[in-house]
Each structure stands twice: as structure tokens, then as C-alpha cells.
Image: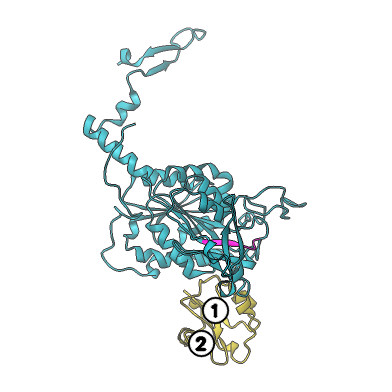
């Protein structure tokens, strides 16, 4: 499991989640923040602090944003 | 006492059946929904353990995680191994029995500062003294989290909690110092948020044959947030964390400007290092037979607000384990006297049966020798 940041974050990048993450696994991708799935420990601290509700658990990611799972994985490795 | 000279196993996992296929971390995640508070340090420890277990290459059914009571003690639910969520403070006792009777198991204990150091303090020190082949993960968040925020045996003096409204008047334990005093053969410390370091120390602890005590600084974001803030803050960490590496001088700080130096009385202190005192910096020897130097390093940990702490392996020495020696004695006894019969032992040769009075209720109960009664 990992948490995933989806479309609502684009051009928002509030960064509350970055401060909240205990393992510093949230980094800047293209126009949005992304979560490194290898570093994410599934604690869920980021989800409630997101002002635009962009963060979902991998299993609850809405179908229309399913591509963000891979996007988070690739953009967090740069 | 019968002394037995047998070659002792060297690794903690020697004697545990190996998996036939390579494993991955996902195989060690159970289907259970993980229930800790969002942001809890326990998540990172779980992830690190799930990452190390496949490396050990053991059969999952030969791994047992025993926990006591507390937030950390939910750990066994989330691992696809055997385990037991046991009684408050008694995990080391249950694990001792398991390790002694089942050499084919890799036995782990998961406990917290309240479980291990308060109600279970007695069991913990004796497991370490006996050197039972266990890996003990002590999650130290310096608070009782499960019961919503009372001071624990590692809370700093003056700590205001629900049970100490005017501030705690207790002197806290330093778990590393305690373990060294209790003759532990492997004592280490790591931090939940430092995955790389935690993984390395977990690896070393699992490899150690004997009791490995690993204290993990673990943040409780709800009831004791930022208890380790100075150690985790990216800007401060270089000056507050003292990494211990066997065989290396204990240097740290920005540009390694600080070092640990020994005073004449044997205690150690942190000081700026320059050409004048570079040669005097303590070189860490985790394998020293005498724990005095390791103990001195453990005292660098600030007892109040955590502003300085060494991390890494403080001590790692080889000593025959309780379970290996006990099993060797059983083997010798078996060779000499045969397998024996447990019921015979229980019955003994001098057992008594207490019989109810037969006629007169005022007559005292009669005791009859079992031997004659048969």
C-alpha cells in the first residue's frame, strides 16, 4: 500500500502534507506534489491535512485518477 | 551444574528452516487493516521490519512475534508470521519459553516503554541477563499512548500529563543504560523516521545470537508529539544525533566538528574537535567485553528534553545463550537417563491424596499415601 496524490493538487501545492509526513516521502513533481511509494509508510498523516482532498490511499483512489499511482511513483524518483 | 562443550550456533537465525523461494516485503504484510493514529511512528517501524524479514530468508511459519500490551503491541497482527498479542509486560517471559522449546523459530518481542519498563521491567531484565535468543524491539515514545497520555517510565521529569498535572517527579529510565546494566549482549538504538539506519540495526539485531535489545525512538503524534523533535529536525539532527560505528572515532556535527571525548574519571562528553584533541576522540568498540565504555556513551542521552542521543550498536558481544545451553543439558540428561516420563515426574514417589471424611463430619480429613492407595 501507499498513499497517492491526485489531480486536485495540480497548481495548488499547499505543502501542509510535506510538514506532516513523518518520513519525508512527499516531494515536488511536475506542478504537483507526489508521494514516493517506496518510502511511504502508510501512516495516513498527510490525508486529513490536505486542503483540497487530493490524497487517497492506494485502494481508495478514484478510478478516474488511477493513473496518478504510477505518476507518483515515477515523478518521486527524479 | 553440568557443563556441556558443544559448538554453539553463531547467528540468531541458525537452526531456523530457510525459505525455498526468495521473499519480498509484501509477503510479510497481513491483510489486517493497520490501526494506529495517522502519523504514528509505528508505521515506519512496521515498514522497516517488513523490509528486513524477507532478507533473512526464513520460512514465514517459523517466525513468531510476541507482544505485550500497548499501541506497539498491535504489531503481530500486521505481519504475515505467527505471533501472539500477549499479557501486559510478559512478552519476554512467553518468548523465553518459546525460544527455549523451539530452536526452529526466530522469536521476536515487540514492546513499548510502558510495557517493557514498567509492568514488564522484571521480565525484560532477566531475559537480557539470561541471554535468551530473542530480538526485542522496544518502541520508546516516552508516553502511555494507548491509554491516552499518561507519563511513562521514560517520560522526562517535570512532564505534565493527565496523571501528572503538576509535572512528573520521577527520574526516567535510560533503556540503553538499563540494558547494559542487565548484562545484555546486544544493545542498540535507532529512530523510527530514519529508515536506512533502522534497517541496518534491525539486520544486526536479527543476526545476533542471544538477546538483542533495540530501542527505537518513536514519535507519538497525538499524545507526545515532537518528543524527539531535536533529533528529527533536518537542520538540527547533525548536531544532536551521535552515530556510533564500531571501530570508528565518534565524530558528528556539521563538518564533523564535534566529537566524544573521555574524561579522566571514565565518563564521556561532547566537545569541538580540532587538531589539538583529534587523537583523543573516543573510538567506538562495540565488541569490548567490558560494557563500561558503552555505558559511558549511553549516558550522553539527555534525560530531559531529548537534545542529544547516540544511535547505533552500543554493544555486541558473544556469550552462550540460555536456550542453547538449556537444550544441551536436556540432551545430555536424555543420553544418560533416557527420555523420561513427565507424568511419572509429576506423580513422584511421595505424593498424597486428601480424602473426605467417610462417616463423622467432625473427623478431620484423612491423608493416605498414594503409594499404599494404588
Question: The numbered mark 1 sits on a residue in which chain?
Answer: A
Colour in which chain B is drawn: cyan
Residue drawn at the location 35% of the way across and 27% of the way down: B346
Q: Which region is colored magenta?
A: B306-311
Q: Residues within 10 Å of mark 1 (few under 14, many from 20)?
A: some
- Residue located 32% across and 27% down the image: B345
The image's mark for residue A65 is 2
Q: Which quadrant: the N terminus of chain B?
A: top left
Task: For residue A51, say whether it is visible.
Answer: yes
Q: Is residue B82 above or below residue B372?
A: below
* Secondary element at tag 1: strand
Residue A54 as seen in the image, left or right of residue B248:
right
Q: Secondary structure at mark 2?
A: helix
Judging depth in this view, the residue of B284 and B212 nearest the camera is B284
Q: Are marks 1 and 2 on the same chain?
A: yes
Depicted B24 relative to depicted B89: above or below: below
The picture places residue B357, in percent across and down from the top left corner, at: 45, 11
Q: Position of residue B210 (x, y in %)?
A: 39, 49
Report the chain shown in yellow: A
Residue B211 or residue B108, whichever sits in front = B211
Q: Can you identify the residue that label 1 sits on?
A: A56
Q: What number of labels is visible?
A: 2
Give x and y (percent) for residue B330: 29, 36
Where residue B44 sits: x, y (%)?
Answer: 51, 67
Instruction: Determine the chain carrying the residue at label 2.
Output: A
Residue B214 belongs to magenta span: no
Amino acid at each position: 500500500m501507499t498513499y497517492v496524490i491526485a489531480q486536485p493538487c495540480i497548481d495548488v501545492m499547499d505543502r501542509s502534507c510535506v510538514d506532516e509526513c513523518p518520513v519525508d516521502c512527499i516531494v515536488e513533481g511536475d506542478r504537483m506534489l507526489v508521494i514516493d511509494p517506496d518510502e511511504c509508510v502508510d501512516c495516513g498523516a498527510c490525508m486529513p491535512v490536505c486542503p483540497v482532498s487530493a490524497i487517497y490511499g492506494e485502494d481508495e483512489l478514484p478510478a478516474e485518477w488511477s493513473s496518478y499511482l504510477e505518476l507518483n511513483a515515477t515523478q518521486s524518483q527524479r | 551444574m553440568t557443563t556441556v562443550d558443544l559448538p554453539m550456533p553463531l547467528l540468531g537465525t541458525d537452526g531456523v528452516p530457510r525459505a525455498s523461494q526468495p521473499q519480498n516485503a509484501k509477503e510479510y504484510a497481513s491483510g489486517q487493516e493497520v490501526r494506529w493514529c495517522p502519523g504514528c511512528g509505528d508505521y515506519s517501524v512496521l515498514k522497516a521490519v517488513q523490509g528486513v524479514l524477507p532478507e533473512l530468508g526464513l520460512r514465514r511459519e517459523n517466525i513468531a512475534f510476541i507482544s505485550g500490551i500497548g499501541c506497539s503491541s498491535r504489531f503481530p497482527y500486521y505481519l504475515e508470521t505467527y505471533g501472539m498479542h500477549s499479557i501486559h509486560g510478559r512478552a519476554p517471559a512467553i518468548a523465553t519459553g518459546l525460544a527455549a522449546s523451539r530452536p526452529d523459530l526466530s522469536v521476536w518481542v515487540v514492546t513499548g516503554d510502558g510495557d517493557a519498563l514498567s509492568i514488564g521491567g522484571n521480565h525484560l531484565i532477566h531475559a537480557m541477563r539470561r541471554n535468551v535468543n530473542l530480538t526485542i524491539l522496544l518502541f520508546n515514545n516516552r508516553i502511555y499512548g494507548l491509554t491516552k497520555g499518561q507519563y511513562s517510565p521514560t517520560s522526562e521529569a517535570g512532564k505534565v500529563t493527565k496523571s501528572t498535572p503538576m509535572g512528573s517527579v520521577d527520574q526516567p529510565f535510560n533503556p540503553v543504560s538499563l540494558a547494559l546494566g542487565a548484562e545484555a549482549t546486544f544493545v542498540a538504538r535507532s529512530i523510527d523516521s530514519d529508515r536506512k539506519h533502522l534497517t541496518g540495526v534491525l539486520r544486526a539485531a536479527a543476526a545476533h545470537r542471544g538477546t538483542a535489545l533495540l530501542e527505537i525512538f518513536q514519535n507519538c503524534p497525538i499524545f507526545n508529539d515532537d518528543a524527539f523533535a531535536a533529533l528529527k529536525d533536518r537542520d538540527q539532527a547533525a548536531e544532536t544525533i551521535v552515530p556510533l560505528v564500531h571501530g570508528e572515532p565518534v565524530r558528528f556535527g556539521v563538518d564533523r566538528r564535534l566529537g566524544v571525548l573521555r574524561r579522566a574519571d571514565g565518563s564521556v562528553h561532547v566537545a569541538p574537535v580540532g587538531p589539538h584533541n583529534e587523537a583523543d576522540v573516543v573510538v567506538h568498540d562495540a565488541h569490548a567485553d567490558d560494557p563500561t565504555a558503552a555505558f559511558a556513551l549511553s549516558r550522553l542521552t539527555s534525560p530531559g528534553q531529548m537534545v542529544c542521543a547516540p544511535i547505533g550498536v552500543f554493544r555486541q558481544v558473544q556469550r552462550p545463550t540460555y536456550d542453547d545451553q538449556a537444550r544441551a543439558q536436556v540432551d545430555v540428561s536424555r543420553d544418560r537417563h533416557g527420555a523420561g516420563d513427565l507424568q511419572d515426574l509429576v506423580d513422584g514417589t511421595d505424593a498424597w491424596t486428601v480424602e473426605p471424611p467417610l462417616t463423622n463430619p467432625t473427623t478431620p480429613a484423612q491423608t493416605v499415601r498414594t503409594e499404599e492407595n494404588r
